[in-house]
Image (cartoon, rainbow, N blue to C red):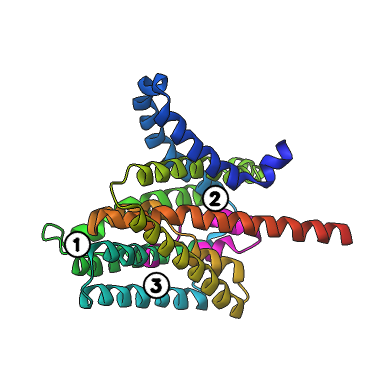
Amino acid sequence: MLKFLKNWTLPVAMLAGASGYFIFANFSFLEPTKPFVFSLIAFLTPTLIFAQLLLTFCKVDPHELMPQPWHGWLLLFQIVTCALMATFLIVVRMDEAYKDVFEGIMVCLICPTATAAAVITGKLGGSASSLTTYTLLSNLLAAIVVPFVFPLVEPHADITFFSAFLLILSKVFPLLLFPFFLAWVLRLFCPPVHRFLLSLRDAAFYLWAVALAIVTGQTVRSLVNSDADLLVEILIALGGLITCCIQFYLGRRIGSVYKDRISAGQALGQKNTVLAIWMAYTYLNPLSSVGPGSYVLWQNIFNSWQLWQKRKKDYRWNNQA
């Protein structure tokens, strides 16, 4: 049983998150616990992300955080595809429901790399340092591009570029930079603590699995409670699936040229969907948030498949040895 849970952590986490939502939604005797559970989730999500990033960054040498050639190509892809999608939405007049589909795709394209992507990258054998560098760059890119482009698609007179820029940075960089600097301080001034954290080999991965269960539950809740037509939701989710496949594929192909296939694939394909959902709610039609909401499921199904492939490869290698 323990071996099964270890091998299929991500699917089990997603199933637990979805099941948890339906249990709380359909059993009335749990009603009194809902305020406590909502408060606990609000506290746990950033805490888990902070802890898993701290454990991951402890393995990263700050001197290795250098820009790579593939970083530029991936950033260019995000800028160009977002600009093209925005231009299409501005120029072409269409029904609001179909517009939501393309807005959802646009959010998934410009959305920065997930802060937890380094966890999976390390698990797959990629470079956590090059992935961390791209995570910082892609978050900065989103903070600059989104306030410029999204208001052109859905005008908001009450949001200025500077306020939107600071708002995005405030939601991303504290959670991204604080664990990085803390890991650096521990490396320099508290080596015993740093060595202890390094000894917790897979702890970051399992912390991330718990966070994934929570995010999956929240995603299912938003999909179930949406008032939108089912066909429209399916089309938006299908757009998220197509976008997910394209970005993982292109990231891996570009990374192969520079011998960093795994890191580049995760950098472009694994998205900070929590931030993407917030951006969709803030700047676009709220229904477009179904796109990044479904992306949570697609990217983690693909991550589960990648981890399964890695286990098979390691098993064959050990048997040959």
View extreme (bottom): residue:
257
- Residue at the image point whose x is 19% and y is 57% from the top: 163
Give the CA separation, mark 2 to mark 1.
36 Å
Quarter in which the C terminus is drawn: bottom right
Q: Give the label, 2 or 1, closer to the camera.
A: 1
Q: Residue 78: give its label.
A: 3
Quarter in which the N terminus is drawn: top right
Identify the amino acid type marked 2: Leu
Q: Earlier in the sequence, mark 2 or mark 3?
A: 3
133 lies above or below 228: below
Mark 2 lies on residue: 188
Indicate left or right for 182 with 85 as reference. right
Q: Residue 63: x and y, percent?
A: 54, 64
Indicate left or right for 18 with 292 as reference. right
Q: Earlier in the sequence, mark 2 or mark 1?
A: 1
- Residue at the image point whose x is 82% and y is 61% from the top: 317
